[in-house]
Image (tube, rainbow, N blue to C red):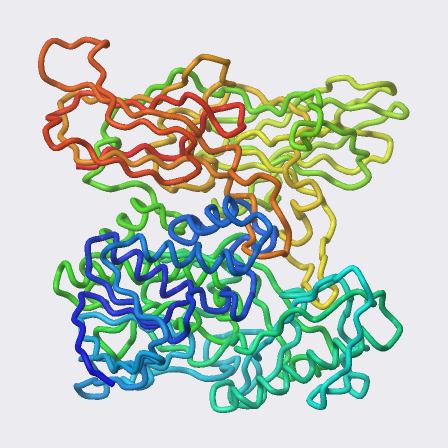
Amino acid sequence: MRTQTVEADVVVVGGGLAGVSAAVAAARLGRQVVLVNNRPVLGGNSSSEVRVWVCGATAHGNQRWARETGIVGEMYVENQYRNPEGNPVYWDDVVLDTVRRETNIRLFLNTDVRDVVATGPEDARRIESVTGWTMGSEILTTFTAPVFLDCTGDGLVGALAGARYRLGKESQAEFGEEWAPPEPVREFLGSTLLFYTKDLGHPVKYVAPETAIDITSTPIPMNRVIRSGDSGAHYWWIEWGGEIDIVDDNERIRDELRGVILGIWDYIKNSGKFDADNLTLEWIGNVPGKREYRRFVGDYTLHQGDVVDQTVFDDGVAFGGWSIDLHPAQGMYAEGAGALQRFSEGVFEIPYRSLYSVNVENMLFAGRDVSATHIAFGAARVMATCGAMGQAAGTAAALCVEHGITPRGVYTDHLDELRQTLLRWDAPAVGIANADPHDHARRAAVTASSTTTRMAAPVVEPADGDPYDAYDVYDLDVDLGIVLPVDPRLDTVELLVSARRDTTLAVEVYSTGKPQNVVPAHLEAKTDVVVPAGDERWVTAHVPFTPDVPQNAVVVLRANPDVAVRTTAPLPAGVLTLVHRVDNDDQNVQISSDELLVQWPTKPLRGRSVVFRAGPDTRALAPERATSGYHRNHGGPHLWASSPMAPGRDEWLRLDWDEPVTAREVRVVFDDDLDVELNTLHHHRTPHETMPTLVKDYRLEVLPAGGVPAEDRWVTVAAETDNRWRLRVHPLPADLGPLRAARLVVGATNGAAQARVVALRVQE
C-alpha cells in the first residue's frame, strides 16, 4: 500500500454524467481538474454496469426542440454515430473518450472517497481535502483544491463535510406544493436493477434459483406490463426501497430486486403465458440504479411551482423538461401505476443558486443531489439534465479559481460572465441572449449568399428507400397544428387539401405563451375556409397575426372528417407538426392529460409537416439570427438558413466590421436538429448516424485589414470535410493581424437542402 497527495484547481467526486460534464467544462476553461469515481467505468446509471438509457429534457419526445447541447449533447451525437444499435459497452467508451481527450483532467477510477477534511463553523464550512482508496492498486490518495464538486448522487462528500441536506418528502406547506404530502415523510423514489435477454434460436430451459421470488404471490402480474420481448430499461418499474433507507439498506434492496428479476424471468419462461422458448437471460445488473437520496440545501431550493410555472431566473444556467415523475414508495409492489407524470408546458430553468451549498463555502454540486424539493427533483433528476447541471457547476468552479472567489461570489459578482461563458460553449441553457463583450460578431454587419424567406413545406416527391423524402395524405380526423415562426407578421396560410364533399375548414392561429413553449396557448386569429369537393387544391386562410416581438405561432386546422391534407418530409427549419390527441406509449405510467403539451403531442407526426405556404416573407431565418444568441428555438429558430443549395454552388455567411478587429478564434454552431431525441441505448433508434441538418463540408475565411482592400485576398484559416459535430472551435493564427471581414463558406450538408448555422462567433 502507498499514499499520495494530489493537488488540483478543481476536484470533482462522482463519475456520472453530472461529474463528467463538470470536469470537462472546468478543464476546457484551463483549470487542472481531478475526476474521482468509485466504479471502474464512467457514466453512473447510464454505464454498462447499470444500463439505464439517458433521459433528459426531450422526455422521450414529449418536449419540443429540447435535446441538450453542450457536453451531454456532444456525447449524444457521438454515440449516435459510433453506436446506432445502442450497445451499452460502446456508450462507456463514448463517455470515457470525452474525458480522456481533455489533457487538463486526471482521472481516478475505482477510487472510493470516504474521508473528508472540512473546517470552520456550521454556517461557514470549508473543505480542505478528500481522501479516496483505489481498489486493486491499494493506493490511498488525498486530493486538495480550492473548489470541490460533489457529483456523487448520494451526496456523500457534502454530508461528510457538514453540508445541509434534505431527505424524503417535504410537506405541502413548506414550499406551497400542491402535490406534496400534507406532512413531511421520509420516503424516496426507489432503486432499480435491470436485465437483458437474448434469442438463441433454439429452445433454452430455465431452472429458477432458490433466491427467485415467486411474483405470482405479489401484485406485480396484475399491476405491471410484462412482455417477453422487453428488456433493459423497459423494466424501469422493477423498483424498490422507497420505504426504507436507500443507502443504509442498499444491499437488502439489491437482493430484493434481483430476486424479483429472477422471479419475473421464471414467470416468463415457465408459466406458459409467453412465447419465450428460445430466450435466455443474458445479463442482470448488480449495482442498483439509485434515483434519490440526499438533496443539498443551496441558496435556492427548486420547487414544484418553478417547474410547472416555468419560473424565469436571472441565474438560470441549465434546463429540464422531464415530467414531475413521482413513483409510489412501495415501488413494484404498489397496487397502482408505477409512476405518475405531470409535464410543464415547455422546458423549465434550473438556477445557479441550486448548485452550491448554503453553508459549505467552496462546494458546488450537480446531479441527484441538486437543491430541490422531492417534487421538483422528480423532474430534475434524469441524467441528461444532471449533465446540464454539471456543465454549469463545472464552469462556475473554473470561474471560482480564476477570480479567487467562492461559488456564492460567482452569483453575486460574476453571474453575467458565468451565463455568457455557458452560451459560448453552447451549454444547455435557455433564455440567454448573446451579450458577450468579447464576441466581435455582435458588432458586425451580417450578410449571406441567400436566405430562406418563405415559411413553407413544399410537395416533395418520394425517393426510393428514403422515408425522410416522402409524402402522404392525412385525413383530418383530429385537429392538427403547424408550428412556425412569425417575424414580423403572418397574414395568410395556404394549404393543399382535398375534400369528399363541399365543406368549410376552420383555421385558427395561437401564440404559445412562453418563448420556449410550443403549444397553442392563446387564440390570436381565426377564419373559416371554403373547401369545394374534389381532388387536391390550394386554399387560403386569412389569419392575420402581428406580434410585438418575433415568436412561434401554432396554426390549428380543426378536425373535419371530409377533409384531407398532404404531409411531407423532411421538416423545414423552424417548423413542427402537432396532433390533438393524448399519446402515451408506456402502460406502466399514468400521465396527467391536463397539460396542453400532453394534449398536443408531436410524436404521431414527428419529422413530417403539413404541406403549406405562409405569407408574407419572413425574417425568421435571416443571417443576423446567427449572432443573436439563444442557440435553440426560443420564440423562433435562431439560426440562418440559406435557400436550397444547388449542386456545385457554395453558400456563405459573412461578417463585416467598420473598424478592424483582432481575434483569437472563430466558433461555429451548426444545427443538429434539437427536436430529434437521440437515445443512448435501445429505447428507440434514429435512422441517421449523422444528423442531416449538420453542415458537412465548410471552410472559414478571413479578410485581413492591411493593404489595399480586395475581395480576392480572402485567407482560409480552417477547412473541414465530413463534419458531424455541432460546435466547432477554430483558433486563428497568432500572426494573422487585424481583420475587416470573416465568412463561413458551406460546400455541403449531411443531407439537408439548406445550409443552417445557429451561431457564428469571432472571439477576441
> Residue 390 versus residue 4: which sits nearer the camera?
4
Q: Quadrant of the C terminus?
A: top left
Q: What percent of the width, then of the height, locates residue 629?
A: 35, 39
Q: Is 656 situated left or right of 59 in this image?
A: left
Q: Is 605 situated left or right of 451 in this image?
A: right
**Which of the 4 image quarters holds residue 117?**
bottom left
Q: Is residue 184 visible?
A: no
Q: In the current view of this chain or complex, which residue is farthest to the front?
A: 202
Q: How many marks?
A: 0
Q: What percent of the width, then of the height, locates residue 754?
A: 49, 24
| Residue appearing at x 62%, y 22% in the figure | 613
| Residue appearing at x 68%, y 73% in the figure | 338
Q: Quadrant of the N terminus?
A: bottom left
Q: Is residue 504 visible?
A: yes
| Residue appearing at x 25%, y 56% in the figure | 27
Looking at the image, is 34 positioned above or below residue 728?
Answer: below
**Which of the 4 image quarters holds residue 349?**
bottom left
Looking at the image, is 72 positioned above or below residue 261?
Answer: above
> Residue 92 versus residue 758: which sits nearer the camera?
92
| Residue appearing at x 44%, y 13% in the figure | 649
Looking at the image, is 502 positioned above or below residue 589?
Answer: above
Q: What percent of the width, then of the height, locates residue 544?
A: 59, 27
**Which of the 4 image quarters holds residue 501?**
top right
Q: What percent of the width, then of the height, locates residue 49?
A: 52, 70
> Residue 18 versus residue 590: which sits nearer the camera?
18
